[in-house]
Image (cartoon, grey):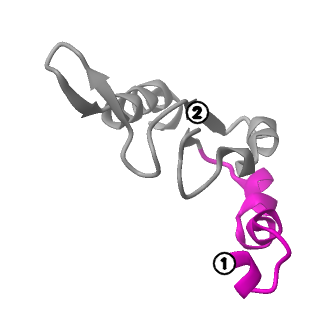
């Protein structure tokens, strides 16, 4: 609906025009992109995976589930849902720290 209101024929056309895709090749610092395939807001099929893979500064982490902002998993030990984003982000920073500390 948003694409039609803004004069685009499809969500993909709107996404291409307003997204940062055309600037991805210029990114010179490490960036992690965390995407859930079940994101109800941003379809994972619209994520520019090929563009991200072409730039070595990007790490694309794509999970099957997670939603839009809160990435949860079923913690069977405690019989509850827990966020897995903190563990992924901390691991990412541990991995890139040696390259950016100077």
- Mark found first going from the N terminus, 2 or 1: 1
Mark 2 and mark 1: Cα distance apart in space: 25 Å
- SS category of the residue bearing label 2: strand
Q: List x then y, in percent, for residue 40.
A: 53, 53
Determine which quarter of the picture holds residue 26: bottom right
**In terms of depth relative to the viewer, which is nearer, 1 or 6?**
1
Q: Which residues are magenta?
A: 1-29
Q: Residue 62 has which mark? A: 2
- SS category of the residue bearing label 1: helix
Determine which quarter of the picture holds residue 1: bottom right
Q: List x then y, in percent, for residue 42.
A: 60, 55
**In terms of depth relative to the viewer, which is nearer, 93 or 79?**
79
Per the image, the residue denoted by label 1 is: 2
Identify the residue at horizontal 66%, vertical 45% (top origin): 44
Give the main secondary structure, helix, strand or loop, of the magenta stretch. Answer: helix
**Left or right: 81 with respect to 23?**
left
**Left or right: 77 with respect to 94?**
left
Identify the residue at horizontal 72%, vertical 35% (top origin): 56
Residue 40 vertical placement versus 87 (above, below): below
Magenta span contains residue 18: yes
Q: Residue 76 has which mark? A: none
Determine which quarter of the picture holds residue 5: bottom right
Q: List x then y, in percent, for residue 89.
A: 40, 35
């Amino acid at each position: 609906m948003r694409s039609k209101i803004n004069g685009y024929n499809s969500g993909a056309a709107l996404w291409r025009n307003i997204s940062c895709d055309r600037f991805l090749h210029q990114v010179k610092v490490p960036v992690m992109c965390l995407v859930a395939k079940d994101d109800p807001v941003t379809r994972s099929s619209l994520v520019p995976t090929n563009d991200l893979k072409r730039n070595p500064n990007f790490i694309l982490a794509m999970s099957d589930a997670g939603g839009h902002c809160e990435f949860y998993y079923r913690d069977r030990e405690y019989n509850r849902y827990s966020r897995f984003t903190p563990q992924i982000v901390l691991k990412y920073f541990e991995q890139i720290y040696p390259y950016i500390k100077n």
